[in-house]
Amino acid sequence: MADEKKLSTPEGCKHLHVTGALCPTCLNEYEAEVYADADGIVWMDRTCPEHGRLVTRMWPDAEHYQWLRSEAFPRTAPQNTCDPTGPCPKGCGTCHRHKRRGTLLEIEVTRNCNLRCPVCFASAVGGEDDPTMDEIGAMYDTIANAVGTDGAVQLTGGEPTTRKDLKDIILLGREKGFWGIEVNTNGLVIANNEGYLEDLVGHGLTGVYLSFDGLTGNVYETTCGRDILKTKLKAIERCREVGIQVVLSVAVVAGLNDGQLGDLLRFALENSDVVAGLALQPAFTSGRFDAERAIPMSSGDVIFELAKQSDGLLDPYDIWPLGCSHPLCDQGVFLVKDESAEHKSGFYPATKRMTFEEYAEGYSPDSPQGSVFLDILCKKGVEVKTGLSVIIMNYMDAVSMDMERMRECSMMVTVPSGEAIPFCSYHLTDDCGRRVYPPWLKESLR
C-alpha cells in the first residue's frame, strides 16, 4: 500500500485508515482512504486515473465500524496456495496473497434455475451445461485438499434441485468423507414434491439453506418475480416433517424488506424447532453503474435496524464478529432459549452472558460462520438445540469491495481445476455486468 500521506481527508471529516478499492469500470485496485464524515458515516474514497473518482458509503456509524474492525481474530492462513495469475481480484486461486483459510466452501452444481428472480447475485440462466459428476468430484477433492473433510460444504447454483442427480451428488460428498452437506435452494421442488426431501436426506443431506426474503407476498413479487410465500412456508414445514434443520437466507433490500427484519427474527424464534439460523445478507449489485457517489446497504445498516426492530432483545453491540473472516464481513449472535430469560421471547443473546475475552478464548478456527457461537456454547454445556443462530454477511461488489476484507474471505467457491476462489471475487462483475470468473472458469475476462 502506498504512503497514506498522498491521500487528503475531506475538510470536517476524520481519517480512519487506508485500504484498496476497485474502479467499477476497469476493476483495477487503487489506494483508497476510509474516513468518517461529521455525521459519523463511514466513506471509502478512491480515484481511477482513467475513469475518475468514486466515493462509497461503507457503514452508518464510525464508532461501531471501528469497534468491529478492532476485534479481528488471529488469522489462520490457507494451505496449498498457488501463485497468483494476475492482480487482485483477478488472480485468485486461492493464491498466497490470501490471509485466511476457507471455512465454508461452495460447489456450484448448476447455473440453471426454475425461477427468474430480479434480485439474484448468481444471475442464473437456463440452457447451460452442468458440471459432470467427475468435475463435481474434483471440486469435492479441492475442498478436501484445502481444508479437509470436516468443514461445511454448500451445494448451490443456480437452483441445485433442477439437477435430477442431486441425491447422487450429495452421496458422493458423503462417500468422500464430508460430514456436513447443505443445499442452497429456493424451496420450490422441496415444497411441491412429496418424498423428495426425504430422498435427499436418505442420501446424506444435513441442512437446507432456504432463500426466504420476507413474510408478505409483495416482497417475493419483487425479489422472485411472483408471490411464492406459501411455497416457502410449505418448504419449511417439509423440513420440520423430515427432521432436518433449515437456515432462512434473507436478501435485505433497502425500501423493500428492511422493515421486516424484526418480524423475520420473531418468525425464526417461534419456529426454532426447525429453523436453526437466520442469515441476513444486504443485497449487493452488479450491472451498469454511473455515479460519483455510491450508497449500498451494509451489514452495519442491517445490524442497527435489526436491533431497533427486535423489541429490546438485541443491541447493536450484542452482535459480534464471527472470527473466521474479516470482522466487517461476518457478524453474528446466538440466541439461547431459556424460560428464565428476561425478554418476553424467552430467549437471550449469548453475548450478554460472556465476555469478549471468553469468546476469543473459546473460538475455534475450524468453526464455519454459522456455528462459531454454537460450538463455544456446546463446550460450556449450554442447551443449543432450540436456539437460533443469527448471522449477517456483508458481501461486496465492485463499488463496495474493500480489498483488505477480500483477502481475508473465508467463504470460497470451488471449481474443477482445483481453484478455490473468494466468494465476492468469484461473483464480481464490472459496471457492464461482465463477470471476471464465469462459471467453472470455462471462460474468463482475466
Image (cartoon, rainbow, N blue to C red):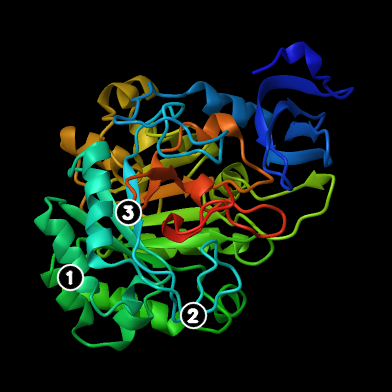
Please tell me in which quadrant of the rendered image residue 53 appears.
Answer: top right
Say whether residue 142 is left or right of residue 314: left
Tell me if mark 2 has few (under 14), some (14-19) or many (20+) residues whose alpha carbon lies within 10 angstroms of its own. some
Residue matched to label 1 = 168
Q: Which element type, helix, strand or loop, lies under badge 2?
A: loop
Q: Quadrant of residue 303?
A: top right
Observer-nearest residue: 140 or 296?
A: 140
| Real-space Cα separation, disc 1 to disc 3, in angstroms | 17 Å
Nearest to viewer (mark 2 / mark 1): 1
Sequence-wise, the earlier of marks 2 and 1 is 2
Residue wearing tag 2: 115
**Helix, strand or loop status at disc 1:** helix
Q: x%, y% of residue 2?
A: 69, 16
Q: CA distance from mark 2 to mark 1?
A: 23 Å
Three-letter code for the amino acid on which mark 1 is drawn: Asp
* Residue bearing the label numbered 3: 416
